[in-house]
Image: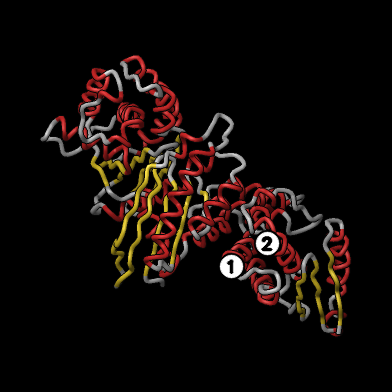
């Protein structure tokens, strides 16, 4: 377990970093950094990132990276959210961001973001009986979660962010009742698909997290010193004040800082409609958010059980995977990996983890249909909600499973963030050999094999007697030679 952990949240509005020391089972925060980068404001209609905004983000990450080096953080997770999910042709930016920060960047799905937010809020608020609603208005999306205790029950991420809404309806700085009405109608349209589900599920308490909720609560307190929580009446009073000001620069609330001012109206409009549609009467604010959830998720990976392992096990059960066969393939795949980790530059822990997960899930497509089940499995993995998994990890897993048999399909690997666009090929080759060796689905020992890896070449060496006892394996390997040759890869099979 590392002594110092750090979580970096590349939000659509602000970048956050929290650094904590793990001591006697507790996380003690030793540093926090926050910069309002407004990454979402740099995306055009086609998802291209503005150069000026990209440079602002990279400069921030360089400062964060220096601080991480200063505190000697041993465990670091960096995640990107809505703006990076929407950005197109982002590989170049991600590589430069990784270099500036000194750590790889994960892009997570909206529901995974919601899960981490709920975890962060639950760890920062005292436990309560019944269900809890958590709302987090970010720069590019809004996450809403209903949970009980530490377990989320409903997770949603809707396309509503304070940066986007502010730009669209208040971009010129003008404030009016008509503009607020239009902004709220747009929010209502996004909330409508989830409204009934959330009202039906119900909750006993509500909490808001992150900057918009905090700014609205502080504004409400400034207007009414008796206020202790966000209320519908308080939000409507803020809107009335903003409309009266007529312009963002004329806002008289001291609690609305200069950097918050440009996105404040959008956040207010979104929360007003969330209160209206979900009939919320009272919402406290929590200083826990996704970055705290990331920290506790990291602690779980080191000390308890990785959330990703729980997800894989759940998917095995849901899709009726033959667990014994999956375990045999996993054991062989990891043994083969150990023989080529150095020559194929696969020492990164994610290589071993991905190969293990792919081995456990390589047959989930059989629950859809036997014909082309590897393709069905890839589709399920690419599109399923997989708690704990970053988007890149999920895509990598889908590519491994989708290419583990028959003709070698390498399409889509170019969409993986380097260096996994190249490393994935070698993981696929290892998984293919492991699956091939266990095609009989028998507990009988497989042939003794040694794998030697070279660039775009793999060499399998068998003991002669062992190989002669498995004639079907020899036939399958002959087919594999042709499959790989079609993609410019060479497989040599030798006996000794």
Q: Residue at x 56, y 55 (%)?
A: 315
- Vertical side of 338 occupied by 439: above or below: above
In the rendered image, the quadrant that contains the N terminus is bottom left
Q: Residue furthest left?
A: 226
Q: Is mark 2 in CB contact (under 8 Å) with mark 1?
A: yes
Q: Quadrant of the C terminus?
A: bottom right
Q: Which mark is residue 423?
A: 2
Q: Residue at x 39, y 18 (%)?
A: 182
Q: Position of residue 388 (x, y in %)?
A: 48, 55
Q: Residue at x 66, y 48 (%)?
A: 415
Q: Residues within 10 Å of mark 2 (few under 14, many from 20)?
A: some
- What is the x, y in percent for residue 80? 48, 48
SS under mark 2:
helix
Q: Considering depth in this image, is 277 or 11 the residue closer to the camera?
A: 11
Q: Is residue 293 visible?
A: yes
Q: CA distance from mark 2 to mark 1?
A: 10 Å
| 109 sits to left or right of 214 | right
Against 128, is 303 above or below?
below
Sequence order check, earlier mark of 2 and 1: 1
Which residue is disc 1 drawn over?
A: 348
Q: Is residue 102 above or below residue 253?
A: below
Question: Relative to 45, is 181 on the left or the right?
Answer: left
**Colour convention:** secondary structure
């Amino acid at each position: 377990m590392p002594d110092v952990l750090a979580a970096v949240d590349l939000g659509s509005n602000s970048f956050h970093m929290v650094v904590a020391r793990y001591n006697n089972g507790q996380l003690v925060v030793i540093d926090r950094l926050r910069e309002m980068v407004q990454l979402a404001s740099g995306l055009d209609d086609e998802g291209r990132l503005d150069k000026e905004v990209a440079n602002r983000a990279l400069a921030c990450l360089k400062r964060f990276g220096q601080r991480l080096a200063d505190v000697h953080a041993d465990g670091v997770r960096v995640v990107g959210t809505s703006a990076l999910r929407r950005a197109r042709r982002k590989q170049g930016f991600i590589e430069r961001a990784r270099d500036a920060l000194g750590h790889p960047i994960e892009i997570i799905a909206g529901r995974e973001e919601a899960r981490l937010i709920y975890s962060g809020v639950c760890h920062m608020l005292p436990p309560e009986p019944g269900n809890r609603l958590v709302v987090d208005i970010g720069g590019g999306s809004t996450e809403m979660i209903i949970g009980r205790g530490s377990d989320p029950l409903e997770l949603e991420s809707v396309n509503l962010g304070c940066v986007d809404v502010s730009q669209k309806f208040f971009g010129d700085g003008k404030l009016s009742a008509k503009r607020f009405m239009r902004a709220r109608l747009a929010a209502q349209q996004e909330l409508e698909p989830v409204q009934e589900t959330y009202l039906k599920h119900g909750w006993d308490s509500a909490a808001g997290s992150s900057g918009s909720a905090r700014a609205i609560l502080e504004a409400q307190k400034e207007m009414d010193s008796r206020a202790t929580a966000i209320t519908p009446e308080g939000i409507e009073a803020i809107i009335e004040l903003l409309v009266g000001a007529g312009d963002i620069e004329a806002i008289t609330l001291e609690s609305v800082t200069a950097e918050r001012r440009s996105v404040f109206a959008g956040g207010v409009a979104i929360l007003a409609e969330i209160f209206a549609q979900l009939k919320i009467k009272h919402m406290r604010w929590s200083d826990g958010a996704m970055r705290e959830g990331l920290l506790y998720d990291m602690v779980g990976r080191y000390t308890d059980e990785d959330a990703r392992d729980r997800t894989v096990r759940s998917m095995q059960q849901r899709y009726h995977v033959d667990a014994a066969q999956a375990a045999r393939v996993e054991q062989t795949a990891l043994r083969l990996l150990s023989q080529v980790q150095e020559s194929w530059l696969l020492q990164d822990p994610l290589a071993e983890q991905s190969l293990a997960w792919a081995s456990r899930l390589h047959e989930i497509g059989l629950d859809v249909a036997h014909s082309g089940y590897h393709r069905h499995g890839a589709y399920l993995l690419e599109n399923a909600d997989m708690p704990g998994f970053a988007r890149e990890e999920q895509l990598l897993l889908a590519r491994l499973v989708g290419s583990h048999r028959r003709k070698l399909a390498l399409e889509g690997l170019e969409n993986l963030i380097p260096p996994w666009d190249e490393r994935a090929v070698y993981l696929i080759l290892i998984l293919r050999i492991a699956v091939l060796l266990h095609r009989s689905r028998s507990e009988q020992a497989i042939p003794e094999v040694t794998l030697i890896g070279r660039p775009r070449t793999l060499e399998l060496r068998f003991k002669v007697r062992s190989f002669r006892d498995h004639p079907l394996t020899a036939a399958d390997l002959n087919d594999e030679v042709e499959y790989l040759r079609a993609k410019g890869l060479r497989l040599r099979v030798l006996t000794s």
